[in-house]
Amino acid sequence: MQRHRADALAELDRAKTVFLTNVSHEFRTPLTLLLGPLDDAIAEADDPAAMARLQLARRNAGRLLRLVNALLDFSRIEAGRAGAQPVPVDVGALTAQVGASFTELCRGAGIELVLDCRPAVAEVDPEMWETIVLNLVSNAVKFTLDGSITVRVQPSEQAVRVQVADTGIGIPAADLPRLFERFYRVSGPRGRSVEGTGIGLSMVHSLVGLHGGTIDVDSTPDVGTTVTIELPASPAAPTTPQLSARPENPFLVEAQQWLRSEPADPSAPA
């Protein structure tokens, strides 16, 4: 009975993954077709009121497309179709490069961004590593209303330790064991936004696992949170990765929208 129950749950899990993939594909095409005309209308608009409405529609359509893309990436990982292509990389330099993209945003939010990234070589897929760092830093921005965010890379003989630490609202101890579950969200957080799908940390957990690494979260409410990743060190000479050129950084765009409003009311519906 236990075996049949496990098989049934596994089949249900596969069905959920297929559903997410299909829905994401179906949503992405019309959203992509919607953004083009919106961009054209914004470029041609000469009325300030109409321009404001079009820009609002463009921001929200863009947000929806980013959520759909995140679901599609997540479903690929869950289905085992997101194979990493690791190369020896100076993780310190790559992490600092990605983290530095939040410099202006953190300054505008009144948060100190500290990049303490020492040279350290590990084998990572550069684009996947970029996604990992962007997820963790944007999460820190979301739940840090004042203080600092520190991105740190430290090498050792056997491992490379990467940490993203903040002085944010923290996470209750009861929620820590479930943080990496897909679609799990901490209830009633005080942050810059109450929006989210609950897949960010689950995806990061899966991506770190694809690199043979481990991830751990230590947090104290009203003190802060530290996410620690450990990767196997590599003795190989590092290469210089070429990150894919993006027309816009979706994580920065999302965070900029948070900063346009006051911190979210924890009693607000999610």
Image (cartoon, rainbow, N blue to C red):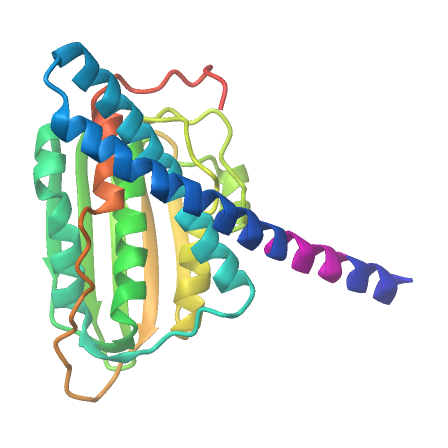
Residue at x-position 18% and y-position 10%? 49
Q: In this view, does 70 lie above or below 188?
A: below
Q: Residue furthest right?
A: 1
Q: Is 67 situated left or right of 105 in this image?
A: right
Give yes or no for residue 16 being in the magenta stretch.
Answer: yes
| Quarter holding residue 244 | bottom left
Point out residue 37 in the picture as x, y percentages from the top left corner.
27, 34
Residue under the image location 55 percent in, 47 percent down = 23
**In the image, residue 62 lies at what x, y percent?**
31, 36
Horizontal arrangement in the rendering, residue 97 relative to residue 30 (left or right) = left
> Where is residue 177 drawn, in percent x and y?
54, 48
Q: Is residue 156 above or below residue 9?
A: below
Q: Is residue 31 toward the left or the right of residue 117 in the image? A: right
Image coords of residue 196 (percent x, y): 43, 35
Q: Which of 49 and 100 is in front in this view?
A: 49
Predominant SS of the magenta segment: helix
Residue 202 visible, this orientation: no
Q: Which of 158 and 149 is in front in this view?
A: 149
Can residue 176 be seen here? Answer: yes
In magenta segment, residue 63: no
**Residue plotted at (27% across, 39% down):** 36
Q: Residue furthest top?
A: 49
Q: How many marks?
A: 0
Pick the residue in front: 21 or 33.
33
Question: The magenta stretch spans which residues?
Answer: 9-17
On the rendered image, what quadrant is the N terminus found in?
Answer: bottom right
